[in-house]
Amino acid sequence: MGRVSSTRRTFVTTAAAAGTAAAVTTAAGPARAAVPTAAPGPSVAVLGGGVAGLTAAHELAERGFAVTVYERRALGGKARSMGVPGSARGGRAELPAEHGFRFIPGIYHNLPDTMRRVPFPGNANGVWDNLVAPPEMAMARTGKEDLRFPLPWPGHRPPDLTLDDIRRALTALLETFSSVPVWESAHFINRMLVFCTSCDERRNGPWEERSWWDFTGAARMSYDYQRLLAVGVTRNIVATRAEEASTRTIGTVLEALLLNSLGRGADGPVDRILDAPTNEAWIDPWVAHLTSLGVGFRVGWTVREVLYGSGRVTGVAVEDPDGARRTVTADHYVQAMPVEHARRTWGTALRAADPQLARCDGLRTDWMTGIQFYLTERAPLVDGHLNCVDSPWSLTAIQQARHWASHDFPADFGDGTAVDCLSVDISEWNKPGVLYGRTARQCTREQVAREVWAQLKAALNDTGRTVLKDSALHSWFLDPGVSGLGTPHPVNEDELLIHPVGTWRLRPAAVTRIPNLFLAGDYVAVDIDLATMEGANASARAAVNGLLDRVGSAAERCAIVPLFRPPELAAAKRHDRLRLRLGLPNLLDLG
């Protein structure tokens, strides 16, 4: 029987029972008496219980503020895991499900710092010790051998190889080299060198206004160049289209991952995941720790409007779990909601008080949603993430059981017959699939599952080996945030911020002109220009620092670690700054 920690499973229940520190009033009645807490400081209402909201609550509670978190659905937001309803049998837990698999690369520094400060039984470094590093990844090609890459890092043991593995690896390399001409590879390398030596002014100016597709010259390159180096690193990884994604955004994250792979400025390996379902390994312990610090939680409370008057936020109109309208009041407010939900709560007067709120209407979101397939046989897949670069729906996936050492999967989950979970992210929802000729939005939930399974098999069962078997498919689970599929008006409650050219300037700062309102979320302007948990964490730290400044607090400010910048390139960037001012291209820019 695998080890299943009972403490891991009970954190959310404990946290949800915690008292609130901010005053809650009904529309017609007086304020309720607040449940006493140990926190003596001013009250703060944190609107949203995802990574940004929990980070803000953490930093504020450590500095003596009385904090209450209001979350409409479930703590952890898009980062949370969940169980498949009705799937548990014989005392086991429900089959593990999630919005999408977690990916915590070594380029993150702020989020890992928070994780180290969340206690976990037996871990010297808190929940951070629950991170594990897959030793390899793969780019799964349809009709070609898959490209497998080792991810070198101290402690990684190369996978055992057979002669067939060696044959397939050599075939994949030769197929790739023959389909991507040497001059195209050299061109891409040149483009990366140009970006890495570009000054901030060029990145924030010309490169922000130029798409990755155009910057890399993808339109005049081979199909494989486009799929591997243009589309593969944009649509599949960050759910944005290469044709419209900002070069600033894509170049920044690729530069950081490249430096990470070289061991520079890294918190850890390029690829890290959690060693158990996310709530068990991270979110539940976090909520329990925040509860111990006096943070109160109100789950099932939906923010309807941020109320404004006399130059301040006067309260927040919310709907409680019973559907009753209430007004929440506090001294300060940190709005930590996704941008597509936050901007619905900003009225005309609030927007007029700070124009950056209105600019957020120009920010765009898109669909990137997870589906899990439960298998009765463990598939012989890569020991890490795989990117199905030729799949119409831009699929990425990871087989999870082998990375969850504390669990015997069939003994701990479901009905005992499922031995693994293949967790898949669907990044493209607007292109026709291979079974029905429909986009993912046009398919029903069942059709989405069949289509994704077919595209996975097309990528993995295509070179004389059956990797995924229909007979081994136990069941599937599609993220419940998606509804109305197959109808004219499908809805996704958990869209992902995307990064078209020119949108960096639309992103707001964490500190607003309203003296008691602060913003946190992955849409807020921070150093890592990408919709990530790291961005959510860093923005929450910036919001807390802004609040501390506003109240004149003597408390230590939150550390915010920027992306690593190699000092060896500083001189090249200074030279590029001079060239930009003279109207000249980057010295290495060959067009």
Image (spheres, rainbow, N blue to C red):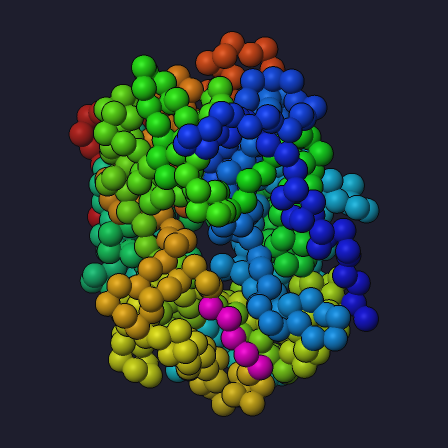
**Residue shown at 32%/19% (left/top)?**
309
**Residue shown at 46%/82% (left/top)?**
457
Closer-to-camera residue (35/109): 35
Is residue 141 visible in the rendered structure shown here? no
**Residue shown at 69%/45% (left/top)?**
14
Q: Is residue 180 above or below residue 328?
A: below
Q: Residue furthest left?
A: 583
Q: How many marks?
A: 0
State yes or no: residue 385 in magenta.
Answer: no
Type of secondary structure dominating the magenta stretch? strand
Residue 486 in percent (x, y) is at: 30, 72
- Residue range of the region highlighted in magenta in the rendering: 474-478
Closer-to-camera residue (234/498): 498
**Residue shown at 33%/66% (left/top)?**
484
Q: Residue furthest front?
A: 28
Is residue 464 visible in the rendered structure shown here? yes
Q: Quadrant of the N terminus?
A: bottom right
Residue 159 in percent (x, y) is at: 67, 70
Residue 579: name its quadrant.
Answer: top left
Q: Is residue 504 above or below residue 12?
A: above
Relative horizontal placement of residue 538, taking residue 114 as reference (left or right): left
Residue 86 in percent (x, y) is at: 60, 72
Residue 296 in percent (x, y) is at: 61, 34
